[in-house]
Image: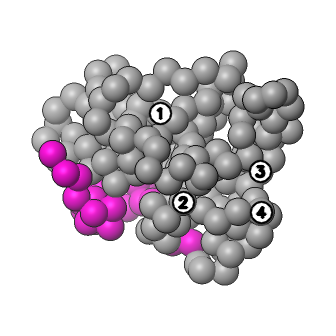
Amino acid sequence: MEPAPLGESWQRVERWLEERGSARELAPPATPADLARAEEQLGTGLHPDHALLLLGHNGSGNFCLPPLYEILSTDEVVTVWRSKTKVWGDGSPPAYAPSWIPFASDGAGGVLHLDVSRPQERIHEHDKLGADHLSSHPMWVSLPALLHYTADALETGRYLDGYRRPGDDSSFLLWED
């Protein structure tokens, strides 16, 4: 199944959130200047899908991607990348490569990242111990796939890789296992 374009999936997520009240808004969009500043600080371009994600919303607001990842703002991308490369960048090969640009964080040292040197490669995780625990679920193939499957799960209520959409009574939209 081919995922919908990233922008279309964002609109579906936004629609679902709007139906549940304004307290669950996503962050405002990044500007081209925000993207340029982040790319300058990273010393590399962002993955094209990552740039589209940020142009949709520069961070999560009250919403998490499944199962518990907050979308990083442009400033947070740079801060987290610097931290990861400083702690994990030594060694041969490094445990965290400079071309791995984080786009979401679990808030406990784990990130989802894309390798800008291999733009066709799937999403990867780097947890606080340096491991990748993502399943083989097709949502991890790309950012458009992640947003597509997220929107489907929100709209239908079906489980997504073992997680259920956030409940309507939750003020911060965390996925439930």
Q: Quadrant of the N terminus?
A: top left
Mark 2–mark 1 Cα distance, whole angstroms, equals: 22 Å
Q: Earlier in the sequence, mark 4 or mark 3?
A: 4
Q: Earlier in the sequence, mark 4 or mark 1?
A: 4
Q: Quadrant of the C terminus?
A: top left
Give 20 or 140, whichever is nearer the viewer: 140
Which residue was labeled with disc 2?
47
| Residue type at numbered disc 3 | Thr
Mark 3–mark 1 Cα distance, whole angstroms, equals: 19 Å
Dot 4 lies on which element?
A: loop
- Describe residue 140's horizontal placement relative to residue 83 as left or right: left
Which residue was labeled with disc 1?
68
Mark 4–mark 3 Cα distance, whole angstroms, equals: 13 Å
Give 98 or 176, whichever is nearer the viewer: 98
| Residue type at numbered disc 4 | Gly
Image depth: mark 3 or mark 1 in front: 3
Label for residue 13?
none
Q: Which residues are magenta?
A: 1-30
Looking at the image, do the residues carrying marks 2 and 1 touch, with CB atoms under 8 Å apart? no
- Describe residue 21's horizontal placement relative to residue 78 as left or right: left
> Which residue is found at the position 47% from the left and 33% from the top?
68
Mark 2–mark 3 Cα distance, whole angstroms, equals: 17 Å
Above or below: residue 102 compared with residue 9 = above
Label for residue 43?
4
Image depth: mark 4 or mark 1 in front: 4
